[in-house]
Image (spheres, rainbow, N blue to C red):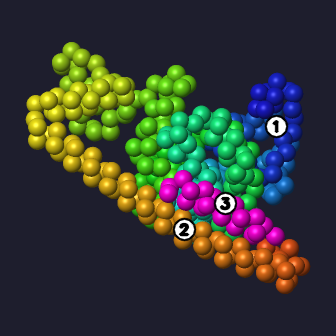
Amino acid sequence: MLDGFRTGKYHGLISWSPDRLSHNMKDAGEIIELIDEEYIQDLTFCTYSFESTPNGKMMLGILFATSKQYSDKLAVDVKRGTEGNVKDNKYTGVTKKGYAVKSGFFMPDEYNWNLLRKAVDMRLYEDKSNTQITSFLTNAKLTERKDADAPRTLVKVTDQMVGNIFADSFYCGLYKYGDNLANLIELSNFKPLITADEYILLNADVAKNFGRTISFYCRNKACLRHNTAEQKRQGIKLSKSIRAKYVLAGIKWKLRHLTKQSEQAYRMYIDRLEQRIAADKAILQNKLAQAKQSLRENEKQYTRYQNFQLDSPKEYDKHHSDKLEHHKQLIDFYEGAITENT
């Protein structure tokens, strides 16, 4: 635009207010210079009356400077607010399927959260493809909503969307927004969709299927990988990340040789494995009990809304039109979960 004034293409400039022209002081200074040299012959604002006089140009320069300061401060304030929201486990404007926002915090959206949990089980433990999971979520009518009190909207499920959910660290409790990271599990009572171990397994599987390479980044600043001066002294060059296959190979070798060299280490491994099995069994029993309890509660709610629909059909249609379908979906889900875990 400024080049247009210099070449005579434009002669007048219309703007809403001076702050629209002062995103940086370089452009603001060039505009005043073009006014001085009469390349800009007419400057009109909707919110401010400009006169091409020494005082008028001085006032314009002051407005440009204050607008730049306001813009810079706003950027800092927004960034600070966003960082604070992430650190406090608060919603930052990006919705997550399976979760709804209540009082600014992410809470499981019960029916949809359970559908996505089933999708994780299908991928990890039933060896189902993303296409099969897409079909399951579509038939189960996966929905989403931002606020816990907002109406649900149907999600158009795709293989890419399923892959993105599995690859999103948010679902295991690591919330990433821009350069900001927060552990939601430590900060609040956030309920993750998947465990950290499941997240690694899911993404290792994704890498195998799509030809990607999984690497781990070293965050230990005391590590040699972050000390370029020491690397140079030793005549080596190390990346700050390492391929996952080398990490896993090292762990595998260490475990194998520990069990060969020490009967005690082997016994410890077996004991821990038995403890893990017992813990998994207890978790399964707890999930089964929760599913039965949730089934009873939703059956009661379903009956309640059936009666309400019969007694007050107009009120039901006006305020509760989707409640019967919602609780029927939950009943079907919990019945399926109980059948699978018994």
Q: Quadrant of residue 303?
A: bottom right
Question: If you read the primary sequence from the N terminus, does the residue marked by circle 2 or circle 1 appear first?
Answer: 1
Q: Quadrant of residue 112?
A: bottom right
For the residue labelled by badge 3, is the local secondary structure a helix, a strand or a loop?
helix
Task: Select label 2 or label 1 by which is in front.
Answer: 2
Q: Quadrant of residue 161?
A: top right
Residue 332: give its label. Answer: 3
Magenta span: predominant SS is helix
- For the residue pair 20 and 263, the one nearer the viewer reads as 263
Q: Is residue 340 part of the magenta span, yes or no?
A: yes
Residue highlighted by disc 2:
292
Mark 1 residue type: Ile
- For the residue pair 41 and 321, the one nearer the viewer reads as 321
Left of 133 or right of it: where is 10?
right
Q: Which residues are magenta?
A: 321-342
For the residue labelled by badge 2, is the local secondary structure a helix, a strand or a loop?
helix
**Which image quadrant: the N terminus?**
top right
Left of 100 or right of it: where is 232?
left
